[in-house]
Image (tube, coloured by chain):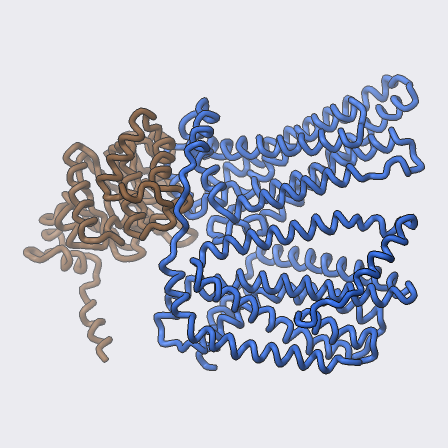
Amino acid sequence: MIKLNHLTKSFNSLVAVNDVCLEIPPGELFGFLGPNGAGKTTTIRIMAGLIQPSSGSAVIDSWDISRNPVEAKQITGFIPDRPYLYGKLTAQEFLRFISGLYHVPPEDTEGRIAQLLELFNLTPWGDELIEGFSHGMKQRLVMASALIHKPRVLIVDEPMVGLDPAGVKLVKRIFRGLCETGVTVFMSTHTLEIAEEMCDRIGIIQDGRLIAVGNVKELKETSGAVGKRLEEIFFKLTGEDKLGELVETLRP
Amino acid sequence: MNQVVCLLYPKIVGFKNRLSIKDRSVIIKLALGITLGLCFWAGIFAVFYRVLVYLKGIEALGDILAAKLLSMVFITFLSLLIFSNIITALSAFFMSEELQLIISSPVDNASLYGTKLLETMVNSSWMVLLFSLPVFLSYGIAYKQHLLYYCVLIGTMIPFIIIGAILGTGIALGLTIVFPAKRIKDIMILLSLILGIALYCLFRYVQPEKLVDPESFRTVVEYFASMEAPTSAFLPSQWATDAVAALLFRGHDGALFSLLLMWSTGLAGMVLLQRFIEKFYFAAWTKSQEASSAKLSRHTVVKRMLNRMLTKLPAPARSVITKDLYCFMRDSSQWSQLLVLSAIIFIYLYNFSVLPLEKSPFPTIYLQNFISFLNLGLAGFTLSAVAVRFAFPAISIEGESFWIIKAAPLDLRRFMWCKFWLNFVFLLVLAEGLIICSNYLLRVGSFMMLVSSVTIALMTFGITSLSIGCGAIYPRFDVENKAQIPTGFGGLIYMILAIVFIGIVIVLEAGPVYMVLMAQLRRASLQTVQLIKIGIAFTAVLVINAFVFYLPMKIGIRKLSALEKY
């Protein structure tokens, strides 16, 4: 469903994403992990069609995002890490706007909006301007907008930031439910417990390179950290297992 | 004091860093800005100097008029300072992003007050101060003043600015205790706009052209005689006028008293405001945090009307246009500019209705058509100025939400053309309205009516394309205040290109229009050579219009597609 072929992105001399190759089948929930500045968001932004790769390609259901952006975007839902929205629209108007952009049939639009507002507990705020929303409410509205056209691929950058525990639980259920219906979810996160609990497979990126891919069991074997938790595997793979010593130096 | 310096440190370093950027485009922008500023500065000086020299030549009445002018200058400056300080203080004391950090740090109220007052004062006053210099310099030179005048002037301006800042900040704080900060800023922007428009219309109604008309001179004398009534003695602007006028017209009499009045008021105001802030600031800050925008009224009628009007459009285009219209209607910084536009149209047409064509030594029919042709350039310029406010920001107003458009299955070409047509329709109605109404008021012939309406329609294509295209080439997605979008480098480039474009079209059409008009005047028919020249000129106009219509949009689409920030 998602195929990254030697995906590379450079910003002047900095190589943010370096020759990443990856294939994700339909219905899989894929977790994308990496330290800050590793290249997660850049990869996601290329997949969402926000930026062009320097070389290589990102293919969504046989559509190359660079060559056939409209077709690829039509079947993709994108949830960014920072929910910048049009503050002067109400939640309902915003969802109507997104429905128009994604060609949702007019006869389905209102029903779908009501359903999604209900699902994300936003019904009481449907007629309120978005500028008055909290970060968590905006995040939930972005999620609702990403699902309004029933995408076959969902690309998510840090979905749990700003959500309350109920919101986190809801999102987990929704993502798992979507995968069961064949939707592919590509999710970047810093919360390793969530990745361990939710994801079918996990990819770890560091300095722009994909250094490990597999399910938790396979990652344990790769890192030689059998029996340990994902957090320790992650630190071992990314070379940040010496963090403890550094933390010690901060003691007053 | 240390804390004040510490709090000001990011501002000072940030300003220094902005200046030390070695990016070529930043240097060009700065150079252009300084050149334009200097031209404007020199213009103010030249106008005031000429007026003052003229007034000085009028016996008895001259000094009264110059003093009255000085008083008007100070009143205008004080109003500008108070308004500008209210708006800046609302941002500095309540809406600035750094406040979360500062208020959560162990910073005492006095330091916060000192820093924010200084910030408000500098941000609101530097421009007034800068552009007041040529005015006062022209007074000094015209009335041959020495060093003492300039010392008194500095001694007057410092407390004058402090008083403006204290009044503005005090009013802002008082309002925030009662109303949510966000709404006050909107209301103040609207009020200042209305004030500006009212002053502009009032000035036009006075018909300053009559000042040079000897027939109405007696009336003007009577008018100024009635203005000799004293202005309120409680206004700081009057104290400032008295201090400066004492040196200019009365040989120092009363200057010291006025200066002391200003300094004592300014310093006492600072102490009082500090007490006020210590007592009420935190409560007002808390209120500003709790307040969100007013509840939205549900525009069912508007919604239905829009749906009907746009029903034939494809769904994505309909969505983009509907969204743009809703955002426009709800953003006071955008829709309030319609008020300015209405004032421009009103004054524009009013000017044509009062033109004394019949008093001219030239044949009326010639003059009517000549002015109508010049009007084409003026209308084009007005259209460009309106487009820089409404069409140029069309891309940038997407703001940080532009990712939604980029991530959507919407071709950016189609998105840009949506923006183009939405603005084109609005600008075309305005352009044709201006041209047809002004031509009607001028009572021009059918040839000029046809030429000017077709030309302005063609130019509207070019001007809309230029504004949308330049807006896409130089987008400003991160501007907090949408009204600031046109004030950047892109806006300047657009205005220069638009003026050059209008100029070329006018120059190309001037010859053919002259030939036709002269032939009409002499009741002669056009020769073959003239017809060929006319044909070539109008073809060139068509080609240039097509070029300006096509190219900016093309480059804009390309630049926007390649933009990697969003």
User: Horizontal and vertical percent for residue B564?
Assistant: 43, 46
Report the label total: 0
Given residues A170 and B216, the one toward you in this image is B216
Residue B388 visible in image: yes
- In the displayed structure, B261 sits above or below A64; it is below
Left or right: where B297 falls relative to A116: right
At a point 34% along the width and 34% down the height, the residue shown is A73
Residue A51 visible in image: no
- In the displayed structure, B145 sits above or below B488; it is below
Give the image quarter of residue A148: top left
- The colour with which the image depicts chain A is brown
- The colour with which the image depicts chain B is blue
Given residues B310 and B285, the one toward you in this image is B285
At a point 38% along the width and 35% down the height, the residue shown is A97
Left or right: where A143 falls relative to B204: left
At a point 36% along the width and 46% down the height, the residue shown is A130
User: Horizontal and vertical percent for residue B34?
Assistant: 66, 59
- In the displayed structure, B170 sits above or below B475; it is below
Left or right: where B303 falls relative to A127: right
The N terminus of chain A sits in image quarter: top left
User: Horizontal and vertical percent for residue B382?
Assistant: 68, 40
Left or right: where B536 falls relative to A123: right
At a point 67% along the width and 30% down the height, the residue shown is B432
Q: Residue furthest left?
A: A227
User: Horizontal and vertical percent for residue B437?
Assistant: 72, 31
- In the displayed structure, B431 sits above or below B171; it is above
The C terminus of chain A sits in image quarter: bottom left
